[in-house]
Amino acid sequence: MGERDRPRTLMPPSPETTQPAVSGAPLVRVRWPWLPAAVAALVVVLTWQAALVTPHLATALGLGPSGAFLDLQGLLAANEAAGRGLDPYALNPLDPYQRPLLYSTWWLWPGHPGLTRADTGRLGYALVAATLAAALLIWRVRSWREAIICIAVLASPAWLLAVYRANNDLVIFVLLALAVWMLQRAGQVWRTIGAALTGAMVILKYYPAAAVIGLLRAPRRRELLALFALVAGIIAVGWPSLVPAFEAISRYGFVVTASVGLQAFGIKVLGESVVPWLPAAAGWIAGLASLFGGYLLAGGSGAARSPGSEDRFMAAAVAGAVMLGCFVIGTSYNYKLVFLWALVPWVLRDAPEALGRNQARALLALLLADCWAGGLAMAALNTLGPHLTRAGRAHALTFFHGVTILVQLGYWVLMGVCLRLALDWSRRQLARLASAP
């Protein structure tokens, strides 16, 4: 039973007090309980703004040479091309990189109100603001320790890359936060809207199909079947909108990053990263071993313990499933790590009880390391590289290639964690539904 489902016989404490640590001890008054969250949000906003308007910082972190919101600009260029009678699924002369649209025609709706590349700035800031609001909806920071961890994640290079590029993954992040929140509500209407959002996300970006495990939150089997039918119906309606995208993908191939690099993310990257020293098969073997290690890290001796808040457990499991979808669908950038955001509050609040303190600390350290390591290495390479000798650059590239392999191994471990969370939560819900009337 989730925290919100438990019967309550006592009035909740005042927001300005906390429960006494010892029975009979006086209540401790906490002034301004909202202050840690407010400070964290302010620091994050200032950090994001610095990355958006400081070319030297963007260059050092490898965020991109073409200015802020470059992925949003590409989407608006596709809309503008369609408005001019051009084919947005062909090489686009209006885009700095001539990128064709590789997604559903549903992404062309911004062109209907006449939005063009000139609107990139204000739409970019609106999307970034919505992303921060969704992040705060997922995790309501309530202590200074949580505020520090919140800042450490949201101000990491992986998140800065997501904000700087304003990729349409941020749209999915916002929609996913809303869908999970709705599926957790007690009212059936809310859950129905959440299921509809889930179906729409599948058409928009493919990999959110993994989020359908969130439908298992339904209280009864009959409603679960109805929600699955709704998702399937929306996918059927939206499927024709994907035909031009599939044709463009077959014509131009996936427009992806280089499969080797400090910012690369995806199932193929590790195997190709080890090629200079080892066969690609060695990378696959190491990756699968790391995946299994992550699976054990998220379970182990704590598998039978209480997972804590059902809402946080669900959010972490759905996020893990979506993250796995991102990982296997193709090579991309490490801004995909934004989908791990819902794991952080579960790791901080529930994992110490569910997994044990040492495993919870190791998982938190791994999350932070994968958010930061690639970006810090990129900054060091871009800052120090021009001042090194030719021999020094060769040694530096070898070192950073090694860092890339370590980071990729960390991703595989995290995928094992995501797999365990998604499977454990799904099994719990299926067992509950099997015994439900």
Image (cartoon, rainbow, N blue to C red):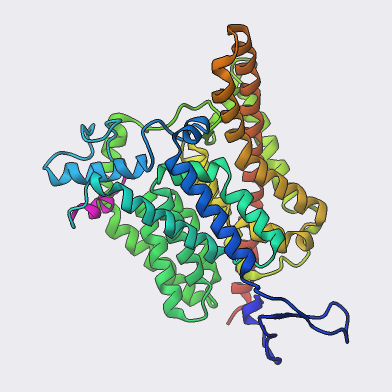
Tell me which secondary structure the magenta stretch mostly adopts: helix
The residue positioned 58% from the left and 26% from the top of the image is: 271
Q: Which residues are magenta?
A: 103-112
Number of marks: 0
Q: Is residue 117 above or below residue 404?
A: below
Q: Is residue 342 above or below residue 30?
A: above
- Please identify the quarter of the rendering in which residue 390 is found: top right
Q: Nearer the viewer, residue 285 or 386?
A: 386
Of all residues shown, which one is farthest toward the left? Answer: 85
Q: Nearer the viewer, residue 164 or 407?
A: 164
Question: Where does residue 98 sit, x and y in percent of width and height?
Answer: 27, 31
The residue positioned 44% from the left and 43% from the top of the image is: 52
Question: Where does residue 200 sit, x and y in percent of width and height?
Answer: 36, 59
Q: Quadrant of the C terminus?
A: bottom right
Question: Where does residue 203 sit, x and y in percent of width and height?
Answer: 35, 53
Q: Quadrant of the N terminus?
A: bottom right
The residue positioned 54% from the left and 67% from the top of the image is: 216
Q: Is residue 206 visible?
A: no
The residue positioned 52% from the left and 30% from the top of the image is: 60
Left or right, residue 182 beside residue 282: left
Q: Is residue 302 visible?
A: yes
Left or right, residue 75 beside residue 317: left
Q: Is residue 109 magenta?
A: yes
Left or right, residue 199 beside residue 276: left
Question: Where does residue 74 sit, x and y in percent of width and height?
Answer: 30, 40
Q: Is residue 251 magenta?
A: no
Q: Nearer the viewer, residue 412 or 237?
A: 412
